[in-house]
Amino acid sequence: MYVDRSESRYSSRGCAIVMVLIVLGVIACSGMIYGAVEYRCTRDASLWLPQYPNSELVESDVNTLFQRFGIGDTTLVYYSPDTQIDIRNWYLENERALEDEDRRRRSGVGLPSWRLMPASDPEGTFIIHTMECAPDLANF
């Protein structure tokens, strides 16, 4: 059966407009999902990885597209003259307070963590903050 183009209900221009709108819709939805994941990771990092008082940033390795602790990997190293025991207690107290508020460390998209290492001076400590946020999305 032959269909005459002049009798079609759909024009080439109309199909092109619909295709462009579909592509724009996919881009907009992807951007909103990316933004929501980015927000969730940065929010989790600000809650679970606060900067220890009077510590200073000595090293930074940020492999994200937009901001620290966003989608990708972030490692920050701070130095404090305080002892590991004092710093560990401060972080554990912060975590207990968050858990008392029914907050969860793992939001489903990122895993914030911290660890301590002795510095070269007798009492100083390096505080290492790491966040791996949506690794599958970062490698896409």
Image (spheres, rainbow, N blue to C red):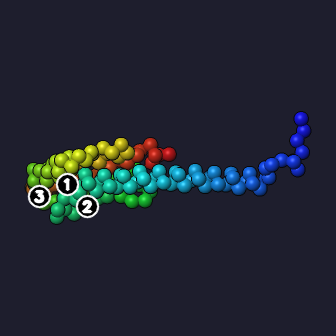
The amino acid on which the numbered mark 3 sits, given as a three-letter code, is: Asp
Give the mark, 1 or 2, whose residue is nearer the N terminus. 2
Residue 45 placed where, x, y %?
A: 30, 53
Separation of disc 3 and disc 2 at Cα? Answer: 15 Å
Identify the residue shown where x is 23% and y is 57%. 50
User: Mark 3 or mark 2: which is in front?
Assistant: 3
Quick one: SS at disc 3?
loop
Identify the residue shown where x is 38% and y is 55%. 39
User: Residue 82 bears which disc, if any?
Assistant: 3
Give the mark, 3 or 2, whose residue is nearer the N terminus. 2
5, above or below 81, in the image: above
Circles 3 and 1, Cβ within 8 Å, touching? The answer is no
User: Residue 58 bears which disc, if any?
Assistant: 2
Q: Nearer the viewer, residue 15 or 84?
A: 15
Q: Nearer the viewer, residue 37 or 66?
A: 37
Separation of disc 1 and disc 2 at Cα? Answer: 9 Å
Q: Nearer the viewer, residue 108 or 129?
A: 108
Q: Residue furthest top?
A: 1
Quick one: SS at disc 1?
strand
Identify the residue shown where x is 31% and y is 58%. 60
Residue 117 placed where, x, y %?
A: 18, 49
Residue 4 placed where, x, y %?
A: 89, 45
Residue 84 seen in this snapshot: no
The amino acid on which the numbered mark 1 sits, given as a three-letter code, is: Phe
In the rendered view of the protein, which quadrant contains the N terminus? top right
Looking at the image, residue 8 sits to the left or right of residue 140; the answer is right
Mark 1 highlights which residue?
Answer: 126
Identify the residue shown where x is 22% and y is 59%. 51
Quick one: SS at disc 2?
strand
Query: Badge 2 local density, few (<14 within 10 Å), some, or many (20+)?
Result: few
